[in-house]
Image (cartoon, rainbow, N blue to C red):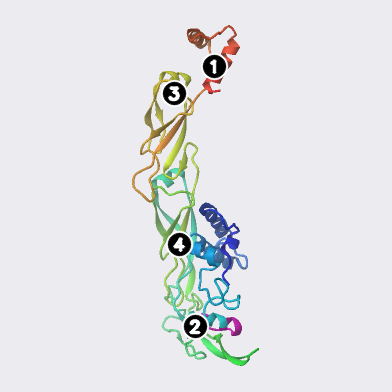
Amino acid sequence: MEKNPYDVLGISKDASADEIKRAYRKLSKKYHPDLNHEAGAEEKFKEVNDAYEILSDPQKKAQFDQFGSTGAQGFGGAGQGFGGGFEGGFDDIFSSFFGGGGASRSRTAPRQGRDLQYEMNLTFEEAIFGKTTEIEYTREEDCDTCNGTGAKPGTSPVTCSHCGGRGFVQVERQTPLGRIMTQQECDVCGGTGKEIKEKCTTCHGSGHIRKKHAVEVKVPAGVEDGNQMRLQGQGEAGVNGGPYGDLFIVFNVAPSDTFKRDGSEIYLEQPITFVQATLGAEIPVKTVHGDVKLKIPAGTQTGTTFRLRGKGAPRLHGTGNGDERVTVKVQTPKSLNKQQKIALKAFAEASGDEVADEGNFLDRLVKALKNE
């Protein structure tokens, strides 16, 4: 039966898209066969990928939420199958009772290789502007010696003499319904329908070897933490002449010490002095595209936000750049020299403030600058 994808990812049914993605990334990394060599890790990795394939696709997710399955509904109601215990057609039902069926026959058909995942670390700036780099990883490839046949050079696999190339044999079994003929995977050819009389000395008859593989990756400008990129045909070698699987690159983007980012929008906190806020000024401001001049109007209050159009990150699935939003913070003087005190006292007197108590005046000044 189809496993519940919510249980596989360890999330609730009302989990958001971001929560689904985070759970998938955590578990796929935990059970990735290249990182986890424990028994059952590869099977768990496949379950996690299958679960994410359902929950990341709105149509499949809606179908599962409604019927409890994304496959055929069988007999006896949605998600229940035949008698509440089986899904699919008659092949699956008889296979569950007696063994064999379509699964054995499919072993002789070409199958696509396994998909792989690679995590790429990027700096904040690399994610903004993109880059071209070469990565290297280990994958299963067709053996160069035998060209993936598994047979010694100069020889070829032959049709299995035990199953006649079908990949399965007929077996008589005793069942609750009496004796019946069923199909079973051929134990001579392993279900492939081919025998290798003289095995390749490099791959020992498997047709595949584990090998380091390098590929150039063009990281698009504007990627974000958690984004994925698919490289077709860069996964592992297929079976029975099937195509290579795909490589999925997951981007891990380091945070910036200066900027905050939300999609294509970039945010910056910019300190300014009391005098700049009061009298106005033109100050240099950092952007990911370089410093620019920002005009501060006279009387600007702390917390005021200014927008720099087109100074944000590139829109990954659109055109142009987002904006940078600069929020100014008026700096409170921690201490004043004699001339500054005289000037501020004159300012206070001109404003009608009582400044007999110098400490009280400075306290009130600090509070005013903090907007208290």
Magenta-drawn segment: 94-105
**Coordinates of residue 153 in the picture (x, y in percent):** 43, 80
Q: Could you say whether the residue bearing mark 3 is in a helix, strand or loop?
A: loop
Q: Could you say whether the residue bearing mark 2 is in a helix, strand or loop?
A: helix
The image quadrant of residue 38 is bottom right
Tell me the distance, in whole angstroms, between the alpha carbons under discs 2 and 3: 76 Å
- Amino acid on which the number 4 mark rests in the picture: Leu
Ranked by sequence position, the earlier of labels 2 and 1 is 2
In the displayed structure, 144 sits above or below 293; it is: below
Q: Could you say whether the residue bearing mark 4 is in a helix, strand or loop?
A: strand
Q: Quick check: marks 1 and 3 in contact, CB under 8 Å?
A: no
Residue 95 forms part of the magenta stretch: yes
Ranked by sequence position, the earlier of labels 1 and 3 is 3
**Coordinates of residue 106 in the picture (x, y in percent):** 48, 80
Residue 247 numbered mark, or none: 4
Q: Is residue 190 visible?
A: no
Ranked by sequence position, the earlier of labels 4 and 3 is 4
**Residue labelled with disc 2:** 105
Residue 309 forms part of the magenta stretch: no
Residue 365 numbered mark, or none: 1
Ranked by sequence position, the earlier of labels 4 and 2 is 2
